[in-house]
Amino acid sequence: MAYELRDHTADIAVAATGDTLEAVVSAVADGLAAASCDDVPADTGERFSLTVSAESREALLFDYLDELIYLRDVRVELPVDHCVESIQHASADDNATGADEWTLEASARGVPLSAIDAREIKAVTYSEMTLERIDDGDGWSAYVVFDV
């Protein structure tokens, strides 16, 4: 899994790849952390778990990143070292609600904002967002723009 920060007008973007859907989503989240802070101490912060659900794969990526920004503000910690453990899909036919549902289980390490020199990322955007299989079917790519 890999990510690259890219300049985007007044915003910042993350382009990421991964062998699996879980890996590419983790890489985008790591890119969000890198956009927020240049140096993260390796020995600070505790791991925490989170679960996010949404109606589509793209909405799941958006909601996951939005939740990380929310948790940063509420917990006063920068989520880093992301690990998306699983992404499950229940189709409308298989789901009691009659709607598609995507669910993500993940964990991250929360580094206290007082321990780092962090830049504020205000929000994730749908602007130009992509999440797709790589042409040869051997992995995934994603592109996400963040409002700074």
Image: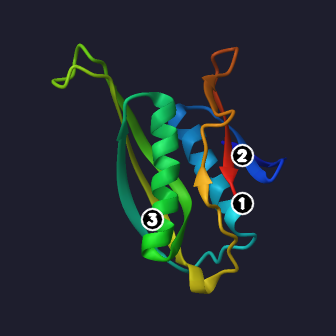
* Amino acid beneath label 1: Ala
Q: Position of residue 125 (x, y in %)?
A: 61, 44
In space, the residues marked 1 and 3 are separated at their CA atoms by: 16 Å
In space, the residues marked 3 and 2 are separated at their CA atoms by: 20 Å
The residue beneath circle 1 is 35
Q: Is residue 76 left or right of residue 125?
A: left
1 and 3 marks in contact (CB < 8 Å): no
Q: Residue at x 66, y 81 (%)?
A: 116
* Amino acid beneath label 2: Val
2 and 1 marks in contact (CB < 8 Å): yes
Q: Within the image, what quadrant is residue 2 found in?
A: top right
3 and 2 marks in contact (CB < 8 Å): no
* Amino acid beneath label 3: Leu
Q: Residue at x 49, y 70 (%)?
A: 73
Is 102 drawn above or below residue 40 in the view shown?
Answer: above
Which quadrant would the C terminus be assigned to in this image? bottom right
- The mark found on residue 71 in the picture is 3
Instruction: Please name the colour scheme applied to the rendered image.
Output: rainbow
Of helix, strand and loop, which one carries label 2?
strand
The residue beneath circle 2 is 14
Q: Residue furthest front?
A: 10
Q: Position of residue 96 (x, y in %)?
A: 15, 24
